[in-house]
Structures are given as C-alpha cells and as structure tokens.
Image (cartoon, rainbow, N blue to C red):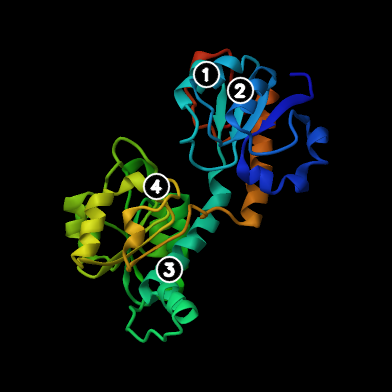
Amino acid sequence: MTQPWNTIIQSGIFGKVLDDFRDRLPDLGFRVLHEHTPLGREHLLALAPEADVVFGPGQGMDAQFFALARRLKVVSLVSSGPEPVDVAAATEHGVVLTNTPEPIAEAVADLTWGLMLGAARQIPQRHHRLKYENAADTELGVRVYGKTLGILGLGHTGKAVARRAAGFSMRLLAWSEDRYWDAAFAAQHGVERAELESLLRQSDFVSLHLRTSPTTVNVLGEAELAMMKPGAFLINTARADLVDERALEQALVRGHLAGVATDVNSDYGRRGPLLDLPNVISTPHVGGRCRETALEQVEQALANAAAVMRGERPRRVVNPEVYATTSLEKRPGEEW
C-alpha cells in the first residue's frame, strides 16, 4: 500500500512516549491524524473513515467504529490483552489485530514480586501508619523466602515470575492448559506441574497469570478459594474476572486468607469493597507501565503495523481467522 499511512494513536501508553517517536513516524510511513492522545469517542469516530492504522488499545473500538473505518487495515495493540477492542467486529471487517505480549511480561513480573513482598510484610500499611499516624507497627509479617509459590498460567509473565523465584529459594508449582505448558522451561527452572486443587492446597502464595476466556472466568470461585492453604496470599496482576470478588472478600473477612495484592479491580479504578479491608493492597493496573517497557512495546507495535501494511503477516496476530475471511494471503517463507 502506498505510504504515508493515515494513523490514529489511541493507546495511552504510546501517548506517554510519543515524543520519543514523533520525528521517526513519517520516515516509517505513518502520518498521525491528530495532535493529542488519548482520543475521546467523538473524535475517534470522526477520524475513523480516514484511518489506515490504529495503535490501541483504547475505549471505543467497537462495531460502530469498525463500520466507519472502511480504509482500516490493522489495529496494532501496544498491549498484551485485546479486551477493549471488539475482536469479532474487527475480523468481520477484515482488520488485522496484533499485540505485543513479550515486552510487558518482565514489567508485570516485577510488580508481581513487589506486591507479593508488600502483602507478606504489610509494607503499604506500615508506611501509612508511620507517615500519617506517627505509629510504629511492630506486628509480625510473613517471610517469602523458602515458601511455595503456585503460578496459574505459565505464559510469558508466569515464566518471568518463576525465574525471579530462584533468588528466594521457593518451591514452584504451576497449573496451565496443555497447549501452553512448556515442559522444557519447567524442567530448566524446577517448576512442578500440578492440578489446580493440589496447587491451591500446597501454595503459600498463589499468583494469577491467565487470560480471560470462557474457561478462566471465576477460575477461583468460592470452592477454589476454600481449597487454598489457610493463611495463604493471593496475587492477581492479570484480570479481575478470574476471581469471584464476593467470595474473595468473604475468604479475607473470615481470615482464611492472610491477604490479597492486586493490580486489577472489577470497577476500573473506582473504590470497591476489597479496598476497605486492611489485608488488601492494590495498584490501578500499572503492571506494564514502565518507560522501558513502553518503548519496547511501541517499537514492536510499529513493526507489526508496518508488516500488515506491506502485505506481510506479523508474528503476533490476535485474530488469525481474519486471514481466512479476507483476501490477505501468506507470503512464501513467512512464519505464521
């Protein structure tokens, strides 16, 4: 396709580092259609008919948007998860959806460990008491070193979390679907494969690294939370709907779980009931928000978008079925 490619930047992460890429974008073939990011819905819909490329995710990429975006060839996500995008509508309109899962994994793993240590030693609570109440909290915390860590989902982020556990001499258990299980990685890093119930009953810390799907929504419900080892900690830096929030609240109130640390919450940043509990710490879904990660993600997203616009198939495609429903074709030698 003839350059330049009319471009919408709907990703907040891209906007954070836009100054690092602004001068390069024209040389790479991208002509940005607007000055500011993120865009409001009306502005997004107004620009939709002109766009060849969109960098997301961002709210508003729904069926109406794709119906208006008649020129659009690719939505290149500067993120791992496609949840804000209507994937079915994108596919119906022949739009390729790409993502950038690898760069974000290390940043999310860093935060996972920060939350795990923070929950075990009650770091935020003690800081708050010292700063605002002038009180030294001398209650006993829990040691992380030498404990058992259960990882639900051994994908990019789950693996990054597992690698960090070596420094804490932890026993590692993991539960993963067959298609995602990496036996070579598990053997190299001493990860034992376990059934979900066995993992929950043995783990001192359970860390969630699953995508939302029909089989993973509420994967930890009332029954599963009851299986968890008394006094265990739950860490969730994945998605809120993996856990039954009401059941989790009750497990904390009853004292079955010692604490929860989360980078997700089902009400998108507004205060929910879990935040009122003294043994819960939370961050507002900032797992991937590191400058280094943002730069790496944008580089990969640019490469993904350019590949689609050149008629190639990028390495990471969220909706591969689009290639079966459009005139997009595989080129000889490409690795699909």
Q: Residue 239 carries which label?
A: 4
Q: Residue 64 carries which label?
A: 1
Q: Which residue is drawn at 62% across and 43% down?
A: 12
**Upstream in sequence: badge 2 or badge 1:** 2
Amino acid type at mark 4 = Arg
Amino acid type at mark 1 = Gln
In the depicted structure, whether residue 334 falls above or below residue 123? above
Q: What element carries label 4?
A: loop
**Upstream in sequence: badge 4 or badge 1:** 1
**Upstream in sequence: badge 3 or badge 1:** 1
Q: Position of residue 65 (x, y in %)?
A: 56, 21
Residue denoted by label 2: 45
Q: Nearer the viewer, mark 4 or mark 1?
A: 1
Separation (CA) of disc 2 from disc 1: 8 Å
Q: What element carries label 3?
A: helix
Separation (CA) of disc 2 from disc 4: 28 Å
Q: Which of marks 3 and 1 is in front?
A: 1
**Upstream in sequence: badge 4 or badge 3:** 3
Separation (CA) of disc 3 from disc 1: 45 Å
